Amino acid sequence: MTEQEPEPIRRRPGGRAARVRQAVLAAAMEALAEGGLARLGIADVAARAGVNETTVYRRWGSREKLALDAMLTGSDEGIPVPDTGAVRTDLAAFARALADYTATPLGRAVVHSAAHNSDDPALAESWQAFWQTRLDRAGVIVHRAVERGELPAGTDARLALELLCAPIQTRAVLGHRPVDPDLPERLADALLDGLRARA
């Protein structure tokens, strides 16, 4: 480096900004678990996280963007996308993680909030972004299966995942039937039977 070149700025990985983000998202997930999306407020989240409201607004800009980030963070942690090397075990593992997640306070709050339509356009947009992001991330399960020859080319990843997840989400919303221990495997088998029958 010459004398004329400024020394590069060195930022500490995991510094204050990362700690603030983690604290705010943890607080938002806690608030969501307690009151659902409709009752999420930036003032409450800021107080729980021990930061100023302006800090939250400066980073996220709106309640809806904060809620989206918190829901995606919680679901990414609670419902990881598996890579077992086979589509059946990938689908079953994903369905099992979803069932486990919807049994948590945060998972129940997300599912119940999603089941109620909102007249708020910003909230509706956040929900659309949430589902699209989750389906895009999990869609790799189907794309990998197509590449391995386990599923036919042109398999609709979004439809496949919706068919896999809907029975679990329905049980979580209605609450009248538990998720049986073997349900994830049964759903994976039924889905694969249907997809392969169309090949």
Image (cartoon, grey):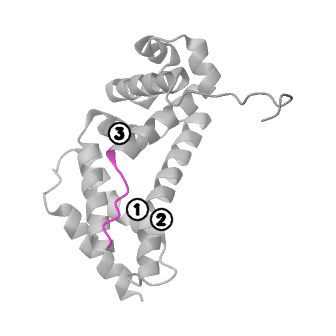
Question: Is any part of residue 63 visible from this angle?
Answer: yes
Estimate the x, y position of residue 35 in percent, counting from the top left. Answer: 36, 25
Looking at the image, residue 19 sits to the left or right of residue 78; the answer is right
Residue 43's place in the image compared with 131, above or below, is above
From the image, tell me which residue sits under label 3. 112
- The structure residue drawn at horizontal position 46% and vertical position 34%, both measured from the top left corner, is 70
Which one is closest to the eye, mark 3 or mark 2? 2
Q: Residue 168 versus residue 47: which sits nearer the camera?
A: 47
Q: CA distance from mark 1 to mark 2?
A: 6 Å
Q: Tally the numbered discs.
A: 3
Q: Quadrant of the C terminus?
A: bottom left
Residue 145, by quadrant, is: bottom left
- The structure residue drawn at horizontal position 51% and vertical position 43%, both measured from the top left corner, is 127
Give the residue furthest to the front: 2
Give the residue furthest to the right: 4
Q: Is there CB contact under 8 Å for labels 3 and 2?
A: no
Given the image, on which type of amino acid does mark 1 rest?
Answer: Glu
Given the image, on which type of amino acid does mark 3 rest?
Answer: His
Q: Quadrant of the N terminus?
A: top right
Estimate the x, y position of residue 91 in percent, counting from the top left. Answer: 31, 66
From the image, tell me which residue sits under label 2. 158
Q: Residue 104 versus residue 9: which sits nearer the camera?
A: 9
Q: Secondary structure at mark 1?
A: helix
Instruction: Kindly report the secondary structure that dominates the magenta region of the rendered protein.
Output: loop
Magenta residue span: 78-85
Q: Is there CB contact under 8 Å for labels 1 and 2?
A: yes
- The structure residue drawn at horizontal position 27% and vertical position 60%, both measured from the top left corner, is 93
Q: Secondary structure at mark 3?
A: helix
From the image, tell me which residue sits under label 1. 162
